[in-house]
Amino acid sequence: MKAILFHQHGGPEVLQFTDVPDPEPRPTEVLVRGGLPNVPIPLPHIPGSDVAGEIAKIGSEVTTVRVGQKVVLAPGVTCGKCAACISGQDNRCRQFTNLGYMIDGGCAEFVRVPEVNCLSCPENLSFEQAAAIPLVFQTAWHMLIARAQLQPGEDVLVLGAGSGVGTAAIQIAKFFGARVIATAGSDEKLQKARELGADHGINHKSQKIRDEVRRITNKRGVDVVFEHVGTATWDDSLASLALAGRLVTCGATTGYDAKIDLRFLFSRQLSLLGSYMGVKSELHTIMKLVAASRLKPVVDRTFPLAEAAAAHAYLESAQQFGKVVLKVL
Ligand SMILES: [Zn+2]
């Protein structure tokens, strides 16, 4: 089969479009033929953690999906047997890994996955749209709902509205009845954020985030800050929190050095919450809401699989609003 393979880490130039042997499903696994976006790691390696496609082959013990069925894949692969897994907290499994991270992913014609990772693909979605859902929606849902316990009527600051997780967070926060303040680096992106439901926009290139948040919330601050940017926004994120506010973070794209004044942390009764991926049951809920058109994937651009290097270069240019998808079929 054709696949995107890399033998070393580096920039987009390390991604090679090449021939590799077809994978064979084990008894409890399926083979999915499909399309996807995203993410780079043992070498040589096939990246890609978000996949939607059609079941091409099933293992001898597979019972819940059939050949030809259209599916979207949960990106988290776990042992399925430990206390964390059986309690539904599978993102706390010590063997947790992602498709495309420590195991081969979906930047290929076929990807081999456990049966439990398959969810039916809603009829109202193309594969490109479906592949734009799992990672970002699951991550944003887990951050806002499981970790920050967002309540109706609360104020949320969503940083990086044009990112995949940002577009998901805006929609999920609105779905739960929160007021959303979104930040982005251009007015065009802020306009798109408003179309997704954001109530207010802050252009972080021309406005100071903490000042705008103070103005919009009548000096109160927000209940929840949705962080994934890191060093560049950390101080503004903390300064934007209301008394007893919660900051939840899943990333640090601009750097991981951060400072906090402990007097500020305890006297303002703040919570700092780390979040990583999400649990499979959350993705089941998300797919129901997507099928009902209550949540929608945001696809910026689609590239053919052979142009994976160009797609990664485009991602690095930070022009996109939403996800960039590679098309296999
Ligand atoms: Zn486990």
Image (cartoon, rainbow, N blue to C red):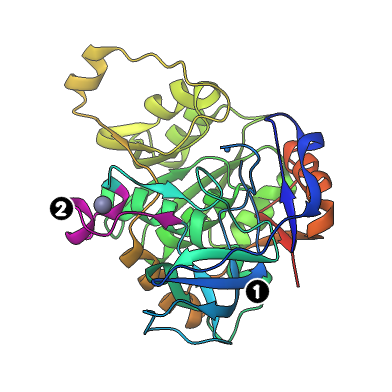
The residue where tag 2 is placed is: 83
Earlier sequence position, callout 1 versus callout 2: 2
Looking at the image, is 210 positioned above or below residue 121? above
Quadrant of the snapshot with the N terminus: bottom right
Total count of labels: 2
Residue 149 in view, yes or no:
no
Residues 208 and 110: in front is 110
| Residue 81 horizontal/vertical position (percent) | 22, 58
Question: Alpha-carbon neighbours of circle 1 within 10 Å: few (<14), some, or many (≥20)?
Answer: many
Report the span colored magenta: 76-91
C-alpha separation, residue under disc 1 versus residue under disc 2: 34 Å
Assess mark 2: CB under 8 A from ligand 1?
A: yes
Residue at coordinates 67% horizontally, 30% vertically from top-left? 9
x and y percentages locating residue 207 in the rendered image: 62, 30
Residue on which the image places disc 1: 127
Q: Classify mark 2: helix, strand or loop.
A: helix
Label 1 is placed on what type of residue? Phe
Instruction: Please state if 264 lies on the left or on the right of 254 as rendered.
Output: left
Q: Residue at x 61, y 55 (%)?
A: 193
